[in-house]
Image (cartoon, rainbow, N blue to C red):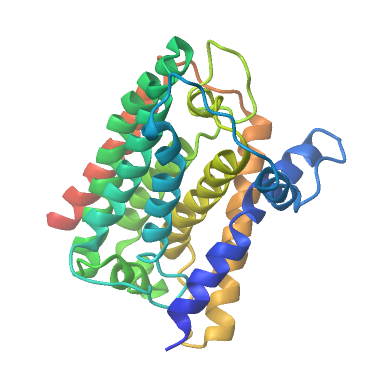
Amino acid sequence: MVEPYVNIMLAIILAPLLPGVINRTKAIFAGRRGQPLLQVYFDLWKLMQKGAVYSRTTTWLFRAGPVIGLSAILAAILLVPLGAAESAISFKGDLILFAYLFGIMRFFTVLAALDTGSAFEGMGASREVTFAALAEPALLMGLAALARQTNYLSLSHMLTGVSPAMWGAASPVLALVAASLFVVFLAENARIPVDDPNTHLELTMIHEVMVLDHGGPDFAFIVYAASLKLWALGAVLIGIAVPIRSGRLWIDVPAAVAGMLLLAVLVGIIESSMARLKLLRVPQLLLGATAFSILALVLVLR
C-alpha cells in the first residue's frame, strides 16, 4: 500500500506551507501584501546555512532539545492518517502514544529552556507546562470519546471510521469533540487566543520565549517541528470535520489537504479578528475544552 507513504511525504513537504497560509490570510485582513506563502521554506534554508552559538553555561540538554523534539513529532506523524488513507504505524492504544509524543517534545523543549539558566526562559517554560497540563485532559478525553464512538483504539482506524453517516447519527458527540480539539489545536500550536507567535513582549510570551537562545540549524529544527505539529494536530481535526471517504486516493487525499489549508485560513481569520486572551483567561478556555470532551464522552457512554 502506498497510502501511508503518501501521508508521510505530504506532511514532510507541505507542513511549512500551513504557517505561510496563516500569515498570508492575516496580511489580507490587514490590507497588506504580506510574506510569500513559501517564506517558512526560505527561512529554514537560510537557518540551515548558518552556524549555532552555544553558551558556556548550557549542557547537552540544550543541544538535544530541538533534535528530540523534531524526532518526537516525526514519530507522531507516523501515527496520523490523512483522509481515508491509514497511517504508516497503527496498533491498539496508539492514541496514548500520540498524546505522549507531544509530551516528550514539550518536556525536552522546556529542559532546553531551563538549561540556559535564564529567568526569562524559565518564565515561559512555567507557563508552557501549566497550560499543557490543562490541554492534555481535553485531548485525551476527546480521543477517548472518539474511540468509544467508533469502537476502535487505534488512531488511524478511529479517524478513518468517521463518516458522513456517523455525523448524521452522532453529530452532537463529534461536534463537541471537534470543538474541544480545535481549542487544543490552537493551544498546542501557540496560536491566538492562547498565545501570539509573533509577539516579543516579555509579559505575554509563552512558547517563543523558550527558544530565544537557539539559532542556526537548532532553530530550524524547532521551526520545522512546529510546522509538523501544526500538521499532525490539524490532520486529527480534519479527519473528524471533513470525513470524505470515497475509497479513491486521488480524491480523499487532495480533499484532506484542502481541508488542512482551509483550517490554516480559519486560524488566520481568528488571529485577525480577535485579540489574545489574558493569561488568567486561558485556563478557563482550556477547562471549557475539557468540559466539551467530557460531555462528549458522557453522551457516548449513556
Q: Residue furthest front?
A: 56
Tell me the quarter of the image containing the N terminus: bottom left
**Residue 203 at x, y = what percent?**
53, 10
Say whether residue 250 is left or right of residue 128.
Answer: right
* Residue 46 shows in the view: yes
**Residue 246 at x, y = what percent?**
48, 84
Say whether residue 141 is left or right of residue 42.
Answer: left
Q: Is residue 94 above or below residue 221?
A: below
Q: Residue furthest left?
A: 302
Say whether residue 98 is left or right of residue 123.
Answer: left
Residue in front for this viewpoint, 116 or 53: 53
**Residue 235 at x, y = what percent?**
46, 60
* Residue 145 shows in the view: no
For the point 75% across and 48% down, which residue is it? Answer: 39
Say whether residue 13 is left or right of residue 3.
Answer: right
**Residue 286 at x, y = what percent?**
35, 31
Residue in front for this viewpoint, 34 or 9: 9
Q: Is residue 130 above or below residue 26?
A: above
Tell me the quarter of the image containing the C terminus: bottom left
Residue in front for this viewpoint, 253 or 197: 197
Q: Is residue 79 above or below residue 84?
A: above
For the point 49% across and 72% down, which residue is it? Answer: 7
Q: Is residue 251 above or below residue 210?
A: below
Residue in front for this viewpoint, 300 or 64: 64
For the point 73% across and 46% down, which residue is it? Answer: 46
Looking at the rendering, which quadrant does residue 14 occupy? bottom right
